[in-house]
Image: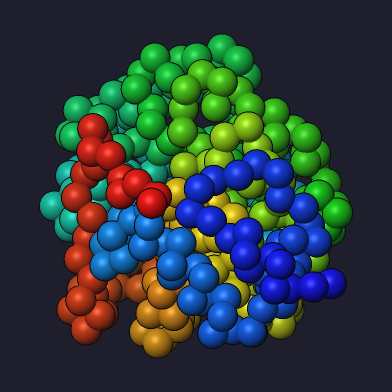
Amino acid sequence: MKIEPMTSQISATPRNDWTVEEVEALFALPFNDLLFHAQSVHRQNFDPNKVQLSTLLNIKTGGCAEDCNYCSQSAHNGADLKASKMIPTNEVIEAAKAAKDGGATRFCMGAAWSSPKDRDMPEIINMVKSVKSLGMDTCMTLGMLSDEQTAQLKEAGLDYYNHNLDTSREYYDKVVTTRTYDDRLATLDRCRDKGIKLCTGGIIGMGETQKDRASMMVTLANLPKHPESIPINMLIPIEGTPFEAKAKIDHFDFVRTIAVARIVMPASYVRLSAGREEMSEELQSLCFFAGANSMFYGDKLLTAGNQGVSDDQNMFAKLGITPEEHREGKPMLQAV
């Protein structure tokens, strides 16, 4: 496999015809070269010293029918997590106001469902409209959606729908067996076709190979339109889940994954998601240099902890990074 011809094709202009071999060649680049290319692409589409902040709220905890091996909220796993009903909209509004006051521009709401029931949709719609009225971007993750549910969310003003692929098609059955890879892609297709922006990525460190990571990137990059947001999660091994004993991923491999995501989806937001609580400032700064320009902000994710707000603010001050302002109606920097 020749790497040099590959680097000559790196561009800040999105393309949808990546091959696994090409993306593997990116992973194989010397670390400094890979980060140089990723940062060069990044600067042609985004301000390199701005990071978009999202806050995530768990609106319905536990009892999920899916058997995802990494998840404490699965009813199939033995994690010490009590299932609860969906929280009321007024609590969501208060959390969203606090997130906005803290600098977040997007508010993400997640429910531990395989898919929402129709009886839950009126409250879900109310949440979307309420958060939207605060002047924030809205995001939901509710599992698989029907055509009617997708249309309802679009009409309510939902900006983003999160539905991660988790991993490659080839490794997928080692992670979850209760829904198929094509099920996930079908929900993404529904949302995109209705005009809802996609937030979809994966989890790194579940025992997958580098080729699996390349394959997942190719699936995402070769969708009809690149997802607007790409969350890259570092596995948090949770006691009571089948993946509790997984070895932690090498940090350089994690940074490489961020850089490759930036190169193959140059105009998308690449988000540091789960696992930041255990990342040093030095590791996160490498991720920002590699092209990460979005992150979850706040003391907690769905069920796992997150780096504290004051710690993030101190880190930003050291790095000269500032939170991105709400970008509705504002074009991103254009590739040259």
Residue at position x 60%, y 44% in the image: 15
Is residue 102 left or right of 333 when viewed as pictured?
left
Residue at position x 67%, y 78% in the image: 29
| Location of residue 192 in the rendering, given as x and y in whole percent from the top left corner | 55, 27
Q: Nearer the viewer, residue 79 or 57?
A: 57
| Location of residue 318 in the rendering, given as x and y in whole percent from the top left corner | 21, 84
- Any part of residue 158 in sight: yes
Q: Nearer the viewer, residue 29 or 216?
A: 29
Instruction: Give the answer, above or below, for where 173 lies relative to 224.
Output: below
Tell me the quarter of the image containing the N terminus: bottom right
- Any part of residue 83 in sight: no
Render colour scheme? rainbow
| Location of residue 255 in the rendering, given as x and y in whole percent from the top left corner | 55, 76
Residue 124 found in image quarter: top left
Residue 317 found in image quarter: bottom left
**Figure label count:** 0
Residue at position x 51%, y 76% in the image: 35
Instruction: Give the answer, above or below, for where 47 lies relative to 267.
Output: below
Residue at position x 38%, y 44% in the image: 108
| Location of residue 14 in the rendering, given as x and y in whole percent from the top left corner | 54, 46
Q: Nearer the viewer, residue 2 or 21?
A: 2
Farthest residue toward the left? Answer: 101
Is residue 41 left or right of 87 when viewed as pictured?
right
Q: Nearer the viewer, residue 25 or 140?
A: 25
Instruction: Give the answer, above or below, for where 32 lies relative to 181.
Output: below
